Amino acid sequence: MLVIFRDAPMPYPSTGELSTLNTLWLGNVRRSMPIPQLGHLLLAFPMGNSSFSLAGIAVDPSQYLFLSPQADHNPILLTHLNEDESSSILILWLGPMFIKDMASFLGIPPDLDKLLHNLPLLQGDKVTSLVMDMAKAYHRGFVNEILEDICYEIIGEVIQSMRIRQQALQKMAQHKDGTIEDVLPRLLKARQFVESCFSSSLKAREVARTTGISEFHFIRMYKAAFGITLRQHIINLRLDSARHRLETSDESVTEIGLRVGYGSLSSFIHAFSKRFGTSPSTYRHLIKISRI
């Protein structure tokens, strides 16, 4: 993995060759600058309160952007949109051949251009967490291997998105092609929205509103595409997050329950016990014993 420490990533003339190198740059954008693009899948993430425009797509501080590989390999324009003097931005270039090879190995059609790329995505999901870890590691001067491990985890999330799309296509096979082409991208965007906001008090109508589909139709199509109801998906996300916090943090059970979206301790304990067969406190105790 290449880590760029220059003030700006240098654009260079295209040779028409596809780069396979994963590359990281974290820096400030004061006005506009050209960003190299040699067929990479590009992840652009604003740091702090930064906002920017990349390839004409505006991204505010609550969002991030995956940009599909560009066929012409020409540099793309990055412009900061803050009223402040500069915007701090993390950019990650991901070599698409490795992603496509892994997808093919797993039996997933490597259709990178069919995912939620070229659309601003809401922060708060697993990719967000990994990017924050990468930025912290970068600033602390961690070795390249640490950054590369995080990079591969981000690639894993891209491949997981490809898997989810393929599974949804299979589940929706009985629907007309036109319906799938129209509805599936909206359902995938709704799923990403849910994975970013599951700890808040989400309502079905609020999620449906992000798709432009009626609430009744959305609920049915969501289950048809992903094999799980919206409500159960939110519950699973909350409980998986709670389990991770029990394993990795010193927060109290009450604090964790509130953090993942439960309004009362009793409802959190009941849901956790139903899912994992033991209470949160007992689960944490068992984890501590297993590490001795």
Image (spheres, rainbow, N blue to C red):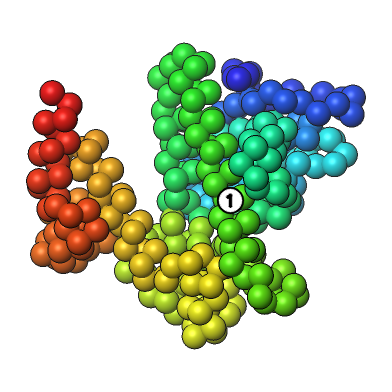
Q: Can you tell which quarter of the image residue 97 is in? A: top right
| Secondary structure found at label 1 | helix
Q: Residue at x 28, y 55 (%)?
A: 239
Image position, residue 269 (x, y; %): 14, 59
* Above or below, comparing residue 99 to residue 143 in the picture: below
Instruction: Report the amino acid beneath label 1.
Output: Arg
Give the total number of marks visible in the rendering. 1
Q: Residue at x 59, y 67 (%)?
A: 171
* Above or below, comparing residue 150 to residue 218 in the picture: above
* Above or below, comparing residue 129 to residue 190 in the picture: above
Q: Residue at x 87, y 39 (%)?
A: 72
Q: Quadrant of the N terminus?
A: top right
Q: Is residue 264 left or right of residue 162?
A: left
Depth check: give the residue in front, 67 or 226.
226
Q: Is residue 110 left or right of residue 143?
A: right
Depth check: give the residue in front, 20 or 28.
20
Q: Residue at x 64, y 25 (%)?
A: 23
Image position, residue 214 (x, y; %): 54, 84
Instruction: Write down the residue under mark 1.
Output: 163
Q: Quadrant of the C terminus?
A: top left
Within 10 angstroms of label 1, few (less than 14), some, or many (20 or more) residues?
Answer: some
The answer to whether residue 207 is seen in the rendering is: yes
The answer to whether residue 83 is seen in the rendering is: no
Q: Is residue 138 left or right of residue 234?
A: right
Q: Can you tell which quarter of the image residue 228 is in? A: bottom left
Depth check: give the residue in front, 256 or 53.
256
Image position, residue 250 (x, y; %): 16, 38
Image position, residue 245 (x, y; %): 24, 43
